[in-house]
Amino acid sequence: MSAGPTICVLCSVLASTGSSPDEVRQILDTLSELEQERGVTGQVALMPLTETARGLRDVDAVAGHPRVGVMQLGELDLAAELGLAPAPDEAELLYARSRVVTSSAAAGLLPPVAAVSPDFTDLDGYRVSTERLRRLGFVGRAVIHPAQLPVVHDVFTPAPGEVAAARRTLAAYEAALLSGSGVMTDEYGRMVDEAVVRASRRIVALARVPRTARRHTHDVTTGLARAVLEDFTVGDVYQHTLGRTVTQTDNAWFALHTQNTAPLHVDQHYASQTEFGRPLVNSAFTIALVTWQSVSDVSQNVMANLGWDEVRLPNLLFEGDTVYSVSEVLETRQSRSRPNVGIVTVLTTGYKHDGTPVITFRRTVMVYRRGRGPSIPEVTSA
């Protein structure tokens, strides 16, 4: 960022956290200065690479910084400093791996990225190691050679049968909730509660759609005719038509209407003294805005919203930022209790004009089936 005019969009920076949280703050201070110099409206996220004993000791403080997006573990330098000689089962690295996974979860971050392996010739051994990392809670792995990429993709992409089972569990759990029960047994007779459901949601979320999946860009005027149960297909991606620039009035009025007294959103003088230097957009406004943007494609024919799950705010949103959104269909099914409606679950992402994500959430809605909902009279011109 300091080498001249910006010629690409910089979304995140990978930085080694060798000593202490002070180093992270120094890096972020430098990034903030460069952002201000170049008029960057968002904030570049940081991916700290934990690869020293001091970095591992301070991983909780580093993961808790508001500008940290995701953690990564660097095992080669860490093992050398600690004097470890990992055997094929890699048991010597278990503490460091578990520590980074736990710290990420405690800080509300996405699961961390696993370390590289320098051996790109033994792909069978690499697969065993990568599968071990997935079981420990990692959701991706850094690579040093293209030959390793297919293994990483294969290991961290849930198998179709696994995804189908997770979706059945989620559907059965939703039915149990509608009947007034928060605990049920699955198709194998095992007890299912919210903890099991979270694991199933994670599996479904990881089952990403290939880049060649068909994408829909709906005109807002045609949303009403399309947003019925029969029009949704798992894997479809909807690029929502409308964008919206957040104004100072939006932020102030939303705080006023919702009785939010936090000065961080409305007090310029107060906000100027924070590390952000300006007011933050109310995060409740962010989820409302991105939900509204998706209405014409997702919930124009809604009967009821059933919930927002796994809401994450990976980057900050400021007054003057423009927000767009996209939704991916994760699951569809017929309602078991109401024959005229179905249930649709989507993964929605709100992002700024430069592609920086500011919010992600899973939203489940109950929508009418075609021809089974209320009708709107057609008006013809005289």
Image (cartoon, rainbow, N blue to C red):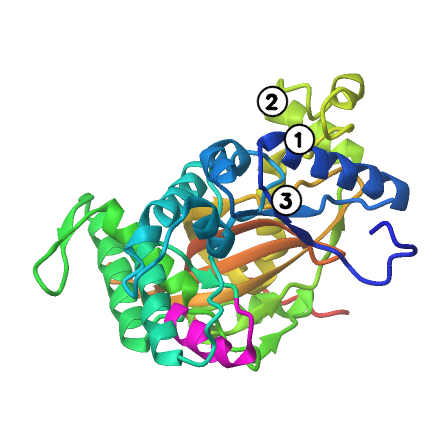
Query: What residue is shown with label 1?
Result: 254
- Figure quadrant of residue 22: top right
As shown in the figure, which amino acid type bears the numbered disc 1?
Phe
User: Which element is circle 2 on?
Assistant: loop
Residue 217 bears which disc, if any?
none
Of 195 and 334, which appears nearest the observer?
A: 195
Q: Is residue 251 above or below residue 314?
A: above
Question: CA–CA distance between discs 2 and 1?
Answer: 8 Å
Q: Quadrant of residue 34?
A: top right
Q: Secondary structure at mark 1?
A: helix
How far apart, in angstroms, are the residues tagged by discs 2 and 3?
A: 21 Å
Q: Mark 1 or mark 2, which is nearer the start of the sequence?
A: 1
For the residue marked with disc 2, what is the amino acid? Answer: Asn
Q: Choose mark 2 or mark 3, whichever is in front.
A: 3
- In reply to whether residue 152 is colored magenta, the answer given is yes
Residue 260 numbered tag: 2
Q: Residue at x 16, y 46 (%)?
A: 183
Q: Residue at x 42, y 39 (%)?
A: 103
